Amino acid sequence: MRKYIIKRILVSIGILFFVTLVIYTLVRCLPASYVETMAMQLSTAPGSKPYEEWLAQLNASYGLDQPIPAGYVHWLGDFLRGNFGDSWKFTVPVVEEFKSVIGVSFVMGAISLILELIIAIPLGIIAATKQYSKSDYIISASALVGISLPTFFFATVLKLIFAVKLGWLDTHGFVGRNFAQLDSMGQFLDKCSHLILPIATLTIVSVGSLMRYTRTNMLEVLNADYIRTARAKGVSEKKVIYHHAFRNTLIPLVTIVGGSLPGLFSGALITETLFSIPGIGYVSYQAMVAGDIPFTMFYLTFIAVLTLLGNLISDILYAVVDPRVRIAS
Amino acid sequence: MAKNKSEGYLSAKESRQIAKANRKVINDLEKKRKRKKVPESEYLTTMHDDKNAVEFDNLHTYFFTDAGVVKSVDGVTFEVPVGKTVGVVGESGCGKSVTSLSLMQLLQRPQGQIVEGEIRLNLGDKAYDIAKMPYEKLQDLRGNFVSMIFQEPMTALNPVFRIGAQLEEVLELHNKDMSKDDMKKRTIELLEMVGIANSEGVYKMFPHELSGGMRQRVVIAMALACNPKVIIADEPTTALDVTIQAQVLDLLRGLKSKINSSIMFITHDLGVIAEMADYVVVMYAGRVVEKGTTEEIFENPAHPYTIGLMASKPVVGKQVDELYSIPGKVPNPIDMPNYCYFKDRCNMCVGQCDGAYPGEISLSDTHKVSCYRYSGNEKKGV
């Protein structure tokens, strides 16, 4: 197993090299250029140098005069030395900006993932065991509604009900108006209350697919011969479902959940933007639009690492739950 | 029920009607089944003959599908005497397996339902009607009193649990006071009994580490763990090669004499039947067309279908270019004719064959056949 993991990590490093090459090329080719915007601004100042001169000077100072391959090698060298550079847009070191926004995104992602699992798996199992019953139809239909609802629409509906009509929560923002006057406990609760709607949105729009996935897999397993064998042994129906069948349903589920781990850190761009939560999704979007190459590169590389890690984790978990893929050590 | 204009095609209206009718029947049956605390008197019954372990009496098992009602088992009556082996033969889809699954109440519910008839199970001091028994009560009998050897060794074992754990589960369920050590000892003993040499090793293995033959043995060991009085062997050798087949059959025969249980042996291999069974039941399209002792069926097959079956098996020492096969195909199970089901394939029809489905005619005390060719010569052969 250790040999396998080491091999996988080495392969992942190779993949990462190509991924960063591709994203560097793409980022350099983006039409949004930080340097052009800045040169435009500087040249409009009275008595300033013309645009072309500013552009050439800025390109040289930001290292954009190099061709893409050379630029990539330069970026890679810095990256490997742990020098991630300063964000152009936020004018602070990339890592600092990243650290200040990742927390809230992670909390939102983690809570909604946990809620998703708690809601989707039991409901999926119920829907599968009572196939074609009323509860199955209700669960499947609401799952479909959840999948079909666009985030922006659902978030707006939630805002309308809970913020505008009922007035329980704020429509947007991470802290309330009187945040500064609250004690530390109050500040914590204030932040929590501002996360309720975003987390609800995230959970409801993504719970449906996991639920349907659980239902489909459970149905498949429940029709398997070994379930009939278990019943023939005299095993009670409850144990058939939650012991014999569920262990087998877990196999595909861990792949999905393992694969969704990077999602915890990638942030939720639309939801964060809609609720004006300064999370990583929102900030990385701003950086990308502004053509902030150091921040975008750092963020995208980080996501690439997490995706590769997520795949590795789900493969390892797969071996844990399915003895058939266990590799002889 | 479904009036199929061309095969397999249903109009939307027809399919709605079918679905509606199905729902009604299924809901009624399910409501009856899901009742809590069914008094024992409701499913307590008496055996017609105390020497029988199981009596199937006019069993009807239907599947309510979207295309119509499939009458998989349509009035099956036969019995399994204590300590004897009854072979059930017939081609694929004739209802052999469904009959045996009915005995265990393992039908795919809610679509599959026993709609009529009795399955009387002799428990020694009393008899239960399985068809009316509540699910929870039956759990104590399954694996303990009645057990089943399944036909697919490759899929019949749960891939994520160790062989030992799967075997011990049966023991644990039905022997509450057995200690862990005793259970392990018994499990190893069972594995040895079915001829697994490396029993200690296999105990710790997962199903995928075993070959098909080994898995089939594990399935057999599982079925025999609690010394059941009735064993249903649903094509236990079909998935195995011939050498293993012989071993498995020897094993079953040895076990039968050791624990004196009755075996209901389902197969479409007539050679295996001849070797194993004391009685033979021939099924066709959900009905029993002929039954009798093994000698009677093999020496003196009466029903044209049985005669066809006998003709279609290879005989050692006889040179044939092509094996005989019965012409035609089984009628559509959704839309059965109201005359003899075999009439369209039969080459020995008589005038009466246009009439209703033939009743059962006794050729001897044990030999019964449902065919008009024998009406009038009832019991002549005695």
Image (tube, rainbow, N blue to C red):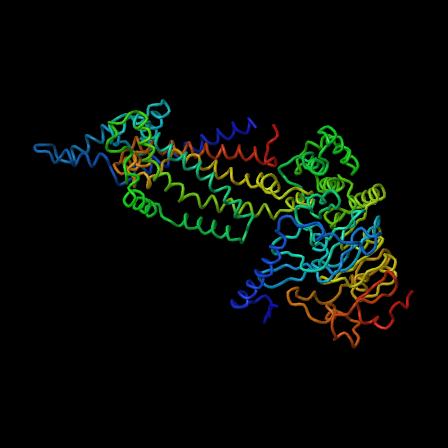
Q: Classify residue A27 as left or right of residue B80.
A: left
Q: Classify residue A286 as left or right of residue B334.
A: left
| Residue drawn at point x = 50 percent, y = 50 percent | A135
| Residue drawn at point x = 62 percent, y = 51 percent | B35
- Residue placed furthest toward the top: A81
- Residue placed furthest toward the bottom: B351
* B3 or B34: nearer the viewer: B34
Residue A306 on image: x %, y %: 42, 32
Q: Name the quadrant containing residue A97.
A: top left
Q: Classify residue A186 as left or right of residue B230.
A: left
- Compared with A247, B67 (above or below) is below
Query: Is residue A18 visible in this depiction of the protein?
Result: no
Residue B21 on image: x %, y %: 57, 64
* A143 or A27: nearer the viewer: A143
- Residue placed furthest toward the left: A47
Q: Quadrant of the C terminus of chain B?
A: bottom right
Q: Classify residue B119 as left or right of residue A205.
A: right
* A44 or B151: nearer the viewer: B151
- Compared with B176, B240 (above or below) is below
Query: Is residue B205 visible in this depiction of the protein?
Result: yes
